[in-house]
Image (spheres, grey):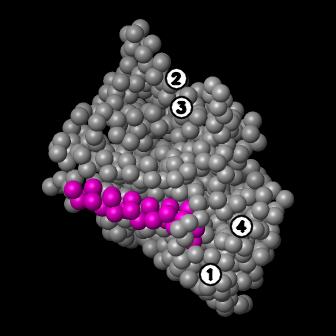
C-alpha cells in the first residue's frame, strides 16, 4: 500500500525490494488460478494447500525484505 | 468434577492471577497513560509476537472460521488469503505509523489524524468509529466465553453459564483496570501456548482418525452438495469476486482496529514491528488448519444448525476429558486477551480524542479517565451480550468492520500524503458510513452486495464498495475545496517525523 513511491526513507536501491510484496496479492486474490483439485498434496486439494503455501511464502518474502531494507537504527 | 472441568478451572484461575500480578511487571508507574495503556512502549519482538497474535487471532476467529467452512464450504477459507496479505500491508503501513507515533507520543490513530489535519471533527469521527467497531467485537468474545461455560458443566454452567460469565467479566475488568496492557500481554503467552497445543493436536489426530484428508474432502464434497442449501469444497466462478474482495477488504481493516493499534504502539522499536510482520503469519497457518477442521466436522457426521459448536463438538468427540478441558480453557483465555485490549484501545480513543479536546492534557488525568472508561466499555459489552441476541451482535460486528474501513483514507492515506482536505475526508467518511450501513441493512446483514457496472454484475464485499465511494467523495471534495481556497488546517507533523 505505498502511495507516492516507496515507503519511508529507504535509499532508492533498496526500495526495489518492496516490489516483492506485490507477489502475495497476485498469488492469492485471483481464485481462478488455484480453484481446482489437482495436484493434491497429502490428500489436500490444490485449492487448500496452495493458499496455505502462500502463508509460508509471504512470511519468507517479508523476511527477505526486512533484512534487505534494514537500517542501522532498526534494533 | 470431571478431569476436564478441573484442568479448565485451574487454567482459568491461573491466568486471572497473572492478570493482577502483571501490574508488577517492569516496576512501572501505572498512573501514566503510556505505561498503563501501552506497557511503557517497551515490548520486544517475542512479547509483541505473543501479544499481537493473542490480540488479532481471537477466540471468535477460531470458532467462526471453521464454522463458516462447515456451513458454507470453500468460501469460508477466505480467512487464509486475508490473514496472508494483511502482513505486507502491516509491514509497510504500521512501521511508518510506529515511527511517527513514537516520535510524537501518539496513543491512538486519531491522535495522528488530529496532528496531521488539524481538524477536531475528523479526529472525533475517527475515534468514535474505532470505539463503535470494537464494541460488538468485545461482545462476541464474551459470548464465546459464555458458550464454553455453559458446555463445560459443573458450577460453571449454572444459569446457562451466565453466572460464570459475570464473574469472569468482573475479574477481567478489574485486572485490566489495575494492570493495563501488561495483563493481556502476560496472559497472551498462556493463551497462545494453549491454542498451539490444541490446534496441533487436533490437526494431527482428528484427520488420522477420520481416514485421512482425501477421504475427508471426498465425504465433505458429497455431504455439502446434498444439503438443502448446497455448497462445495471449491468456489463457483460467481464466487471469485466475493472471495477476493472479502480477503482484500478484511486485510485492509485488520490493522486499523483500535486493539491492533494499541498492541503495535506497545512495541519498543520499528524493527520489532517489521520483524513481527514476517513472524506473525505463523498464526495464519494455524488459522488455516483450524479452517480445515470445518471439513473434519462435516466428515465426522456432525449435524447442527449452531455452527459455532462444531469445533468444541469435535474436540469433545475425539479427545479425553482432560484435554477437552485444555481446549475449552484455550477458547476462554483466547477471548479474555483480545477483550481486554479492545477495551483499552476504545478507552484510549475516548479519553484522548473525544473527551480531552485540543488541550494536551497528558499524564495522570488522561490515564485515570482511560481506566474508568475501560470499565465502562466492558460493562456496555456485557449488557450487549445479556440483552441483544447473538445474531445481532454478529450483524453489528460485520457492520463494525465495514465502518472501520472508512477511516482508511484519513489514517492510512494521510500517512503518505497531505493532499486530501480534512473537510473532504470528513464528508467521504460520512458517505462511506452511511453507504455501508444502508447496504448492510438492505442485504439483511450479509457481507455481499451486487454492484451493477455497465453490463456486468459484481457481487462483492460491501465494505470495499463503501470505501470506494468514500475515496471518490474525498478526492472530488478536496479538488473543489482546494479550488475554492478553503482553509485546509495546519499540519503539525514534519517529513522527519515519518522516518
Residue B361 horizontal/vertical position (percent): 38, 40
Of tags 1 and 3, which is closer to the observer?
1
Q: Residue at x 44, y 71 (%)?
A: B186
Of tags 4 and 3, which is closer to the observer?
4
Q: CA distance from mark 1 to mark 2?
A: 52 Å
Which quadrant of the view contains residue A62? bottom left
Check residue B168 in the rendering and tell me which mark sits there, or answer none. none
Q: CA distance from mark 2 to mark 3?
A: 9 Å
Judged left or right of residue B237, residue B40 is left
Secondary element at tag 4: helix
Check residue B468 in the rendering and tell me which mark sits there, or answer none. 3
Q: Observer-nearest residue: B448 or B230?
A: B230
Instruction: Tell me whether marks 4 and 3 sit on the same chain.
Output: yes
Q: Observer-nearest residue: B273 or B160?
A: B273
**Quadrant showing the C terminus of chain B:** top left
Which quadrant of the view contains residue B154? bottom right
Can you say whether B333 is above or below B489 in the image? below
Part of the protein shown in magenta: A44-68
Which residue is most to the left?
A72
**Residue pointed to by mark 2:** B473
Q: Residue at x 61, y 54 (%)?
A: B137
Pointer 1 or 4: first along the chain: 1
Q: Residue at x 34, y 27 (%)?
A: B418
Secondary element at tag 3: helix
**Residue pointed to by mark 4:** B221
Pointer 1 or 3: first along the chain: 1
Residue B291 horizontal/vertical position (percent): 60, 66
Secondary element at tag 1: loop
Amino acid at each position: 500500500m505505498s502511495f507516492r513511491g516507496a515507503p519511508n526513507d529507504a535509499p532508492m536501491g533498496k526500495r526495489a525490494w518492496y516490489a516483492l510484496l506485490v507477489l502475495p496479492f497476485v498469488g492469492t486474490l485471483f481464485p481462478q488460478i488455484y480453484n481446482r483439485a489437482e495436484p493434491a498434496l497429502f490428500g489436500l486439494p490444490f485449492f487448500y494447500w496452495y493458499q496455505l503455501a502462500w502463508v509460508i511464502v509471504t512470511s519468507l518474502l517479508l523476511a527477505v525484505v526486512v533484512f534487505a531494507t534494514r537500517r542501522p537504527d532498526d534494533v | 468434577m470431571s478431569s476436564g472441568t478441573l484442568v479448565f478451572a485451574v487454567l482459568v484461575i491461573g491466568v486471572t492471577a497473572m492478570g493482577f500480578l502483571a501490574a508488577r511487571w517492569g516496576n512501572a508507574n501505572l498512573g501514566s497513560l503510556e505505561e498503563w495503556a501501552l506497557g511503557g512502549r517497551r515490548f520486544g519482538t517475542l512479547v509483541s509476537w505473543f501479544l499481537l497474535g493473542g490480540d488479532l487471532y481471537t477466540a471468535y476467529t477460531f470458532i467462526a472460521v471453521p464454522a463458516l467452512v462447515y456451513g458454507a464450504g470453500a468460501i469460508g477459507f477466505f480467512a487464509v488469503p486475508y490473514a496472508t496479505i494483511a502482513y505486507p500491508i502491516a509491514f509497510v503501513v504500521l512501521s511508518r505509523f510506529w515511527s511517527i507515533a513514537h516520535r510524537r507520543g501518539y496513543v491512538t490513530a486519531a491522535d495522528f489524524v488530529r496532528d496531521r489535519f488539524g481538524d477536531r471533527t475528523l479526529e472525533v469521527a475517527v475515534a468514535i468509529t474505532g470505539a463503535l467497531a470494537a464494541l460488538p467485537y468485545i461482545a462476541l468474545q464474551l459470548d464465546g466465553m459464555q458458550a464454553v461455560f455453559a458446555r463445560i458443566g459443573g458450577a460453571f454452567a449454572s444459569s446457562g453459564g451466565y453466572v460464570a460469565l459475570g464473574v469472569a467479566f468482573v475479574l477481567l475488568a478489574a485486572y485490566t483496570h489495575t494492570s493495563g496492557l501488561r495483563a493481556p500481554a502476560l496472559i497472551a503467552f498462556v493463551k497462545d501456548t494453549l491454542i498451539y497445543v490444541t490446534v496441533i493436536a487436533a490437526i494431527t489426530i482428528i484427520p488420522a482418525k477420520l481416514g485421512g484428508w482425501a477421504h475427508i474432502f471426498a465425504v465433505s464434497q458429497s455431504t455439502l452438495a446434498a444439503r438443502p442449501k448446497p455448497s462445495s469444497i471449491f468456489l463457483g466462478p460467481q464466487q471469485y469476486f466475493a472471495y477476493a474482495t472479502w480477503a482484500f477488504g478484511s486485510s485492509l481493516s485488520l490493522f486499523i482496529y483500535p486493539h491492533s493499534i494499541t498492541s503495535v504502539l506497545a512495541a519498543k522499536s520499528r524493527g520489532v514491528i517489521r520483524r513481527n510482520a514476517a513472524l506473525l503469519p505463523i498464526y495464519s497457518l494455524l488459522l488455516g488448519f483450524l479452517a480445515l477442521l470445518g471439513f473434519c466436522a462435516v466428515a465426522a457426521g456432525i449435524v447442527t444448525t449452531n455452527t459455532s459448536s462444531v469445533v468444541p463438538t469435535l474436540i469433545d468427540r475425539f479427545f479425553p476429558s482432560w484435554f477437552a478441558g485444555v481446549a475449552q480453557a484455550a477458547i476462554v483465555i483466547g477471548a479474555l486477551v483480545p477483550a481486554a485490549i479492545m477495551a483499552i484501545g476504545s478507552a484510549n480513543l475516548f479519553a484522548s480524542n473525544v473527551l480531552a479536546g485540543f488541550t494536551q492534557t497528558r499524564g495522570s488525568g488522561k490515564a485515570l479517565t482511560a481506566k474508568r472508561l475501560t470499565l465502562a466499555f466492558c460493562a456496555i459489552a456485557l449488557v450487549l451480550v445479556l440483552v441483544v441476541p447473538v445474531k445481532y451482535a454478529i450483524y453489528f460486528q460485520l457492520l463494525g468492520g465495514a465502518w472501520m474501513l472508512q477511516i482508511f483514507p484519513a489514517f492510512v492515506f494521510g500517512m503518505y500524503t497531505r493532499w486530501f482536505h480534512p473537510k473532504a475526508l470528513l464528508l467521504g467518511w460520512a458517505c462511506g458510513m452511511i453507504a455501508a450501513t444502508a447496504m448492510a441493512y438492505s442485504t439483511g446483514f450479509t457481507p455481499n452486495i451486487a454492484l451493477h457496472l455497465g453490463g456486468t454484475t459484481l457481487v462483492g464485499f460491501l465494505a470495499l464498495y463503501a470505501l470506494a465511494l468514500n475515496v471518490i467523495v474525498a478526492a472530488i471534495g478536496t479538488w473543489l475545496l482546494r479550488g475554492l481556497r478553503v482553509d485546509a488546517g495546519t499540519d503539525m507533523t514534519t517529513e522527519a517525523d515519518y522516518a
